[in-house]
Amino acid sequence: FLAAFTLTLGTSVLTLQFKEGYFFSGREYFLQQPLFRPLFNLAVSVFPAALYVFSLRYIQFNDRLCLKLFFISIIFTVFFGVRLTVLTIVLFFILHSIFYREGKFSLFKLSCICGFLFLCAVVLGDIREGNFNFLHSLFMTTFKFFYGNNFSDTRDFAWLLSLWDGEYLYGKTYVAALISFIPRFLSPLREEWGFSMYTNALTGFDSEVMPGLRPGLFGEPFLNFGYPG
C-alpha cells in the first residue's frame, strides 16, 4: 500500500511539472502554483518515510522488491529538485547498513562515498539551474563547498538572527506546518506564519520564487521558544 500510494503520488507530481517543462526543478514549479503546492508538500513528506521503510526492510530481511522500490523512489525524488531528500536517504541507508553489520565498515570507502555524495549534490544543483556540464560541476566542487548553499545552515541561522526582532513565535510556525495541506491563499495563518514565509519576510525575499532559508536543526525551535525550544 505504501509503495502504491507513494509511486502514484510521485507520478502525479512529475506529470504536472513535466507538462510545464520543469524536469529537475519541481520545487520551483510548485512555488508558483499555490493550488498544487500541497500535493508537492505531501510528496516530499511521504517519499522520505517510504524510502526509510524500503531501505530498512531490505537491510533487515534482504527483500529485493524493497531494494527495487528504493531505487525507483530515489529517481522520483531527483526530479523533485530537493537535494536534501535524496542525499539524506542515501546516508540513512549507508549508516543503517553499518549498524546492521555491528559497526564494521571501511573508513576509506565511507570517505569516498561521502565525497561522491557531495559531488552529486553539486551536480544536482547545477542540473536544477539548467547547467548539464559535468566537468564544470567537478571543477566548481571546491568553490561550492565553501561558498555554495550545500552547507548553509549556520550562515542562514546567523543571517536570520541578525534581522530578528527578539520576539518569539511561540509555535506559530509549527501550527502552520501542521495545516500545510491547506493552500496558503486559503489560510491567513499559513500565509503569515509558514516558516519559509516568515524567513522570507525577515530577509525581504519574494516567496513566489524563494523557498525560505534553512537555519538548521535548532533554528526554528529557537525562534519559537528560545533556548528551552
Image: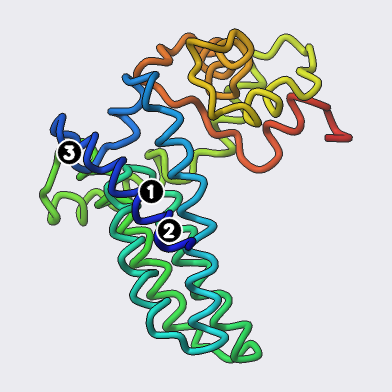
- Disc with the residue nearer the chain's start (3 vs 2): 3
Q: Judging from the image, what secondary structure is the residue with disc 3 in?
A: helix
Q: Residues within 10 Å of mark 2 (few under 14, many from 20)?
A: some
User: Residue 102 appears in which quarter of the rendering?
Assistant: bottom right
Residue beneath disc 3: 18
Q: Nearer the viewer, residue 121 or 42?
A: 42
User: Is residue 84 found left or right of 16 in the rendered image?
Assistant: right
Q: Judging from the image, what secondary structure is the residue with disc 2 in?
A: helix
Numbered label attached to residue 87: 2
- Which marked residue is nearer to the observer: mark 1 or mark 3? 3
Residue beneath disc 1: 83
Q: Residues within 10 Å of mark 3 (few under 14, many from 20)?
A: some
User: Is residue 103 found left or right of 35 in the rendered image?
Assistant: right
Depicted 136 relative to depicted 117: above or below: above
Q: What is the quadrant of the C terminus in the image?
A: top right
Q: Nearer the viewer, residue 113 or 54?
A: 54
Q: Judging from the image, what secondary structure is the residue with disc 1 in?
A: helix
User: Is residue 5 found left or right of 120 in the rendered image?
Assistant: right
User: Residue 22 appears in which quarter of the rendering?
Assistant: top left
Numbered label attached to residue 109: none
Q: What amino acid is at disc 3? A: Phe
User: Residue 25 appears in which quarter of the rendering?
Assistant: top left
Q: Nearer the viewer, residue 75 or 210?
A: 75
Q: What amino acid is at disc 1? A: Arg
